[in-house]
Amino acid sequence: MRVAEALALARARGLARLDAQLLLTLRLAKPRSWLLAHDDAELPAAVEQQFRASLAQRLDGVPMAYLSGEREFHGLSLAVTPAVLVPRPDTETLVDWALEGLAGRSRPRVLDLGTGSGAIAVAIGHARRDAQVTATDIDAAALALAQANARRHGVRVEGLLGSWWQPLAGRRFDLIVSNPPYIAEGDPHLPALRHEPRHALTAGVDGLDALRLIAAAAAGHLEPGGQLLLEHGADQGAAVRALIAAGGMQGQETRRDLGNRERCTGGMVGSA
């Protein structure tokens, strides 16, 4: 099989041209420009076999990030595996807000609950080298990946294994951020996300279980004037504002994502 034939096969089976080119560049370890200049090149048998396997996976909905092992987030290249959610551009809204909230603070203590790939923790730590960043996750493989991503970018991240507040007794922070699971069980979008870890996606009948747990205890882990910022579903802004208020925090505010949907809500503990 030649390069042009491989790309034609992918298009015939319904794969977008760019995805087909990316899959082939991954297996050949060549840039896209090489494909365009060598469309008559014969593929080694092993590469053809790998390409066909990757093509089948991509057509089955496996995220490109899992096939490539990489994803860009907030200008940083991160390693990604099926142990974690694929970082989304909309989550950059949370990082930008966090960095805004840290302005003027010296050596801030930052906590990322349920860090997954470490995208949020690493992005904050990379932008604020003086920050003392802690990241937790219930999954050891996810936590190891987050710390590997931190090392990749020269960021120091303290990793703690455990569920939400469990490994954080007595700890307080200036900023707490989290992109927890917030999809309702039975949501019609879940089949399209079937290759990503279910425990990182769903949180109870209404999708608010993790957000409830985080908001209820956050004030006890924040310094005076400290801030909690949470990512959530586009239809959950009002509910999360109420949860933050019920948790004893003030100044509830919601920010919108790149698609102008309510995506992140925050509150703060009053100053002493």
Image (cartoon, helix red, strand yellow):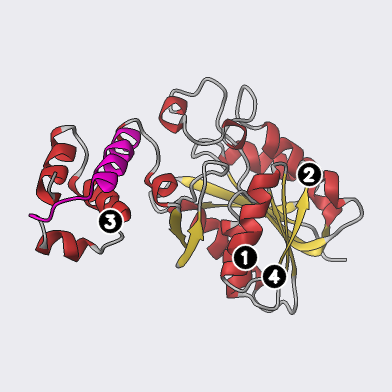
Q: Residue lying farthest left?
A: 40
**From the viewer's perspective, is residue 54 above or below residue 110?**
above
- Helix, strand or loop at label 4? It is loop
Judged by depth in the image, the label closer to the viewer, 3 or 1, is: 3
**From the viewer's perspective, is residue 155 above or below residue 179?**
below
Q: Which residue is rendered at x = 56% and y = 61% of the image?
A: 95
Residue 190: image location, x then y, percent: 47, 27
Q: Which residue is rendered at x = 40% and y = 46% of the image?
A: 67
What distance separates the C-alpha of mark 1 from that of mark 2?
19 Å
Q: Is residue 46 magenta?
A: yes
Q: In the rendered image, is residue 124 in sight?
A: no
Q: Which residue is rendered at x = 44% and y = 56% of the image?
A: 71
Give the quadrant of residue 41. Answer: bottom left
- Helix, strand or loop at label 2? It is loop
- Helix, strand or loop at label 3? It is helix
Residue 107: image location, x then y, percent: 75, 77
Residue type of the residue flagged with mark 4: Arg
Disc ID at residue 28: 3
Q: Is the residue marked by circle 3 packed among few (<14), some (14-19), or many (20+) residues within 10 Å?
A: some
Q: Which badge, 4 or 3, is on the more N-terminal residue?
A: 3
